[in-house]
Image (cartoon, rainbow, N blue to C red):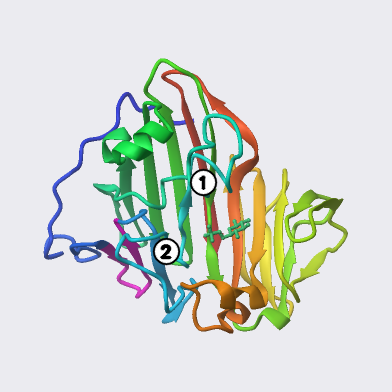
Amino acid sequence: MVERSKKPVPIPVSSTGAENPGFVLESDRVKLSLPTGESAEILLHGATVISWVVDGQEKLFLSEKAALDGSKPVRGGIPLVFPVFGKSTEGPTAALPQHGFARLCKWELLGRTSEADTAIQVDFGLGPENLTVDQRNQWPYEFGLIYSVNLSISSLETKMLVRNEGSETFDFNVLFHTYFRIPDINNLTIEGLKGTSYKCKVIKSEAVEEEVELPIRSEVDRVYAGVPNAVQVKNGGETIFKVGRTNLEDIVVWNPWEGASKMADFGPEDGYKNMICIEAGAVSKWHSLEPQSVWEGSAVTNI
Ligand code: BG6
């Protein structure tokens, strides 16, 4: 756990990128790049990573109909889920929309926090002052989030720090809703889930995963609770992504299949064949955070 005495104040950054060649701030986004060609793009809206390029290839799926103007959550990239996963019907998060408010808010850019030719990190912050009055009323806790995105030559790390800045304990879920771009869902398998209990939302059931290499050949929406090791996404048996986690015990696997055609912001209609959501999170149970305490979790995807 990292202790930070208070939420950092935004650091002024160059909008031209002239002083930081690997870091460019535009009106609605931050662009990161390394001298070796890797790059990432993060919208201030939702602090949503919308692009990650390695070897000239885009690694994230972004719907061609995704709204990038803040009017709705981004359909693709890495939307952030906080403080609730899904939709609560009761308890302190019941008034919040599906997946909470973090993906809906405009985050503060806190600045670039590391410098090296092989890695670059940028931090974003969110607190009650960034919420609308309605969102404040829906979840009236004093909190501070720091979200870090670290681009390195062959990996992308996302890290969330949650701090309780009030005098009341609160419960939360957190999750990185990562949409990976894949060559063909019909060649895809997922390794690393065998032996893990899961809840299936498609047929409302619970089971233990039996497959060493799980094929995805129809709609899937499962929450795997307490996944012990890294999860590998494979194309034709070859690993294309390896997702490691710290303090994020769960993995959600989601692909809407032909149901994508009913989603107004999903495109192209057969785009589900080129995506798989492998979502690292802490969602199968509530995490309780006492006043003045900090929680931190991270996920790193290696190519
Ligand atoms: C997944 C959920 O994480 O997100 C699914 O498990 C949900 O049930 C999906 O459909 C997409 O959610 P949304 O709110 O972005 O459409």
Question: Residue 74 has which mark?
Answer: 2
Q: Which residues are magenta?
A: 30-44
2 or 1: mark nearer the eye: 2
Answer whether residue 99 is magenta in the image. no
Q: Nearer the viewer, residue 119 or 97?
A: 97
In the image: residue 134, left or right of residue 90: left
Identify which residue is drawn at 46% across, 57% down.
Answer: 79
Whether residue 239 is visible, yes or no, is: no
Q: Which mark is residue 51?
A: none
Report which quarter residue 230 is drawn in: bottom right
Give the vertical position of 54 relative to 277 (above or below).
below
Task: Please state if 8 lies on the left or on the right of 205 as rendered.
Answer: left
Q: Residue at x 29, y 50 (%)?
A: 106
**Amino acid carrying mark 1 in the image:** Ser
Q: Identify the residue under disc 1.
A: 298
Q: Is residue 257 left or right of residue 51?
A: right
Asked where in the image residue 23 lies, by quadrant, the reply is bottom left
- 163, above or below 120, in the image: above
Q: Residue at x 38, y 48 (%)?
A: 148
Percent from the top left, x then y, of residue 185?
A: 67, 79
Task: Give the amino acid at mark 2.
Answer: Val
* Residue occupying the point 18% across, 61% down: 20
The x, y position of residue 43, in whole percent, is: 32, 61
Going from N to C along the chain, the mark reached first, 2 or 1, is: 2
SS type, badge 2: loop
Q: Dot 1: what SS? A: strand
